[in-house]
Amino acid sequence: MVEQLDKQYVLHTYARNYVNFKKGINATLFDEKDKDYIDFTSGIGVVSVGHGNKEVADAIYKQVSNITHISNLYAIEPQAKLAEKIAQLSEMDVATFFSNSGAEANEGAIKIARKYGETKFNKKRYKVITLEHSFHGRTITTVKATGQSSMHSPNFSPYPDGFKYDARIDDIYNSIDDETVAVMIELVQGEGGVQPFEKKDIQELAKFLKEAGILLIIDEVQTGAYRTGEFLASNLYEIEPDVITMAKGLGGGVPIGAVITKHKDIFQPGDHGSTFGGNYLSCAAANKVLELLDSYKNSGELDEIIIYFDKKLNEIQNKFPEILTQKVGIGLMKGFRIKDNETLTALISKCFEEGVLVLKAGRNTLRLLPPLTISKKEIEEGFKRLENALTKIK
Ligand SMILES: *Cc1c(COP(=O)(O)O)cnc(C)c1O
C-alpha cells in the first residue's frame, strides 16, 4: 500500500526501502508486521534522544496546544532561551539565527561570509574554500559548496561562483588568495566517510585563519548536539570558529537549523530571514532535547555508552578483520571501511533483513549513527544482528 502510493505520488528522489514503520521506542523500530529493527541510523543522526521520546513529545504538545507559530516579527521566548542555551553549552560568546535545515544553516553561514567579505576589506572578498569529500547540503549554493564533483551536475547549472575545493587541510594554506573570505569544513566528514581530521591540524588552521582575518566556518550539521561526545565537535577540538552551523540532532526529529556566530553585528534587519525558522514548535523541541542531552552528558551516561559501543565495534572487527578493514569515527559517529563497495552493498541489505538499520557513507564506509540514548541491551542486540549479517555475506 505505502509502496504503491509512494511510487505514484511522491517524486522519485530517493532509492527507498519499502518498509512501513509503525512504532518506535528509543533505538528500536517496529514495522507493520511487528518485526523489530535496531536503529543504528537515528534517521541519519536526527533522532538524538531516541524514537518516541516522551519528554520531548510532552514539551512539544504543551507548546503547540498553546502557540505553534507567531512569525519572526515578534520576539519568541523559546527561541531566545534556545539561543542562550546554545551560547552556554558552546562556552562561546555567540548569537544564533535559526533556520529549518542544515543546508539552510550553511546558506546563512555563507551569507555571513559574503557580507563580511564585502564590508570588512578594502577590496571585496567572496571566495569560500571547502574540502573534497565534504557535504554541505542540497540547495544550489550548498551543493556547489560541497566538494564532490558528482554533485555538480550540469542539470542544475549555472551554480554560484566562489567555491574552491582542496584535497587536504594542508592545501588550504596555498589556496588562499586576496579574494578568499572563508574556509568551511566539517571536523568529522560524515557523508564523505566518517573521517575525522587531526586536532593539531585543525588548531593550526584556526590560528592561521584568525591571524589572516579569514573566517573559519565549521559545518556541525552532523557532528553537533553531542554526536561526538561533546556539545560541539568544536569543543572537542578546542577551537572557537567564526561561524558554526547545526541541524540534524538539535530538534530530535523536529526540523531546525542554527547559524551560530561570534560576529553578532554582521547582520542587520533585512539581511536574512525565515518564515518558519525558530518558531515555538521547533524551539520547544530543541530546548527539551538540549536539556535532556546536557544532563545525560553530565551524568556520565553518554561517555559510558560511547565506550560500550566502541568496545562492541572492536570485538566485531576482530571477528571479521578481512571485511571490516578499518574502524573510523568519533563518539557515536562511527563506522568501518569495508573491503570493497560490493561487499558494503550486500552487507547493508543483509543487515536490513537481519533487523539492524545501518548507513553507507562515501564509497566504502559502513556508517553507524545510533540515537545517543541507545541502551546497552539495544547495542548488544544490534551487534548480534550485524554479526549474523557479516557471517551470511562472508
Ligand atoms: C546532512 C548534512 C547537511 C544538510 O542538511 P539538510 O538538513 O539535509 O539540509 C549539511 N552538512 C552536513 C555536514 C550534513 O551532514
Image: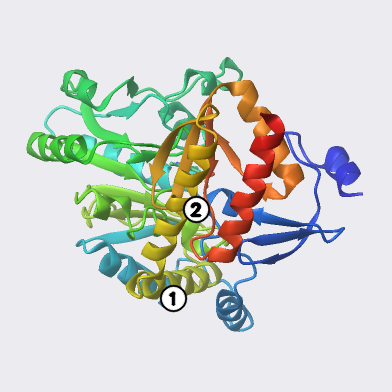
Regarding residue 209, the answer to whether it shows in the image is yes
Q: Is mark 1 within 8 Å of ligand 1?
A: no
Q: Mark 2 Cα within 10 Å, few/some/many (few <14, many 20+)? A: many
Reading the image, the residue beneath label 2 is 248
Q: Say which amino acid is labelled 1.
A: Pro
Regarding residue 271, the answer to whether it shows in the image is no
**Direction from residue 347 to residue 135 in the image, left or right:** left
**Residue 273 image position (x, y, % from top left):** 43, 54
Corner quadrant of residue 208: top left
Reading the image, the residue beneath label 1 is 78
Q: Find numbered disc 2 in the image and state the secondary structure of the residue it sits on.
A: helix
**Residue 225 image position (x, y, % from top left):** 40, 59
**Direction from residue 203 to residue 164 in the image, left or right:** right
Along the line of sight, the residue nearer the viewer: 155 or 37: 37
Disc with the residue nearer the chain's start (1 vs 2)? 1
- Write the residue at 31% across / 71% down: 84
**Residue 5 image position (x, y, % from top left):** 88, 45
- Write the residue at 58% across / 76% down: 60
Q: Is mark 2 within 8 Å of ligand 1?
A: yes
